[in-house]
Image: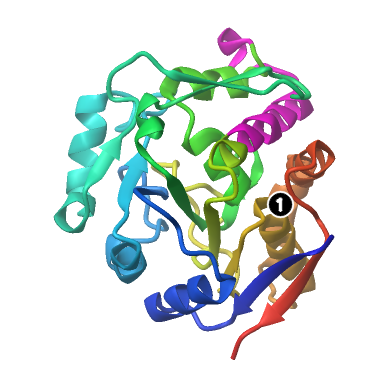
Amino acid sequence: MSAKVYFSREITPETVEKLYQLVGKELPGKVAVKLHSGEKGNQNFLKPEFWKPMIEAVQGTVVECNTAYNGERNTTEKHLKLISDHGWDKYFTVDLMDAEGPDLVLDVPNGKRIQKNYVGKNLVNYDSMLVLSHFKGHPMGGYGGALKQLAIGVASSFGKAYVHGAGEPEKIWTADHDSFLESMADAAMSVHEYFKGNTVYINVMKNMSVDCDCCAVAEDPCMADIGILASLDPIAIDQACLDLVYASDDPGRDHLLERIESRNGVHTVEAAAELGFGSREYELIEVK
């Protein structure tokens, strides 16, 4: 069955809220808001002011986890300082979910590559999740969207290494590439299913660099902004974003596609669809 994906070419905080309302899912209880808080030096991440009305509308708590690589987010102390420097705690309650161990272990019994997913233990404190993704390129995954937020974003520092290494954390940068992409699909499924349908996904196609918001030194955006998408299906929303890039006639499109295709980025979507927690088939509903 095809999923509904709502789409607007207008990129404003108000449009984010409007599309959330159109999705028609009121997130219950305590809402975790997963977004990318930005690496130090990155110029492309979406700032707190952009997301503020949406986060306030659901009375959400911004959640993040530490990274598994060198930078300003790989220890709790440094990460909390950067979160403050970027202004997140000025507006929101922020929960660094893996600030102290042990991790929460989610089972992935039908996973293609991994059967366990290690996430920030504070995930247990939430009843639902709003996933706010900045769609752009990525040095390893090819692109970053909803599936990456679920897989890598919610994973603990150890969990990030575990997913990257396809179950062997010591192979964080050396694992077979498609196995890593399939591990992301496995991990994404475990988080999506943890919330039992109480998840809404919003992707913003703005500041589209070939690099992720995790890059301290990132290329400037290479193509024009496209819009905002919202859905209950993380696979459909990422597929719709990829399709919108392919359909664009912007001169910078090919540069972004080279990054996506050279990393076989679509394979994460393919693997996720095979796992069955969403669909690549969707109805794009454009909102004026």
48 displayed left or right of 250: left
Q: Which residues are magenta?
A: 168-190
Residue at 23% across, 41% down: 82
Q: Is residue 144 in view from this perspective?
A: no
Residue at 74% across, 30% down: 182
Tell me if residue 149 comes above or below residue 257 in the rendering: above
Give the overall secondary structure of the magenta segment. helix
Q: Quadrant of residue 194?
A: top right
Return the residue nearer the eye: 244 or 138.
Answer: 244
Q: Quadrant of residue 123?
A: top left
Return the residue nearer the eye: 161 or 286.
Answer: 286
Residue linked to disc 1: 235
Q: Quadrant of residue 238?
A: bottom right
Estimate the x, y position of residue 180 in percent, counting from the top left: 69, 26
Estimate the x, y position of residue 150 in percent, counting from the top left: 55, 41
For the image, the number of numbered tags is: 1
Secondary-structure class at tag 1: helix
169 is within the stretch colored magenta: yes
Return the residue nearer the eye: 276 or 245.
Answer: 276
Estimate the x, y position of residue 240 in percent, counting from the top left: 72, 64
In this view, the residue farthest toward the left is 90
Q: Is residue 31 in view from this perspective?
A: yes
Residue kind at label 1, given as amino acid type = Ile
Return the residue nearer the eye: 176 or 256.
Answer: 176
Estimate the x, y position of residue 4 in percent, counting from the top left: 71, 69
130 displayed left or right of 142: left
Residue at 58% across, 64% down: 222
The C terminus: image quadrant:
bottom right
184 is within the stretch colored magenta: yes
Crowd tier of the residue under label 1, counting other residues whose Cα lies within 10 Å: few below 14, some 14–19, many 20 or above: many
Tell me if residue 198 comes above or below residue 214 in the rendering: below
96 displayed left or right of 204: left
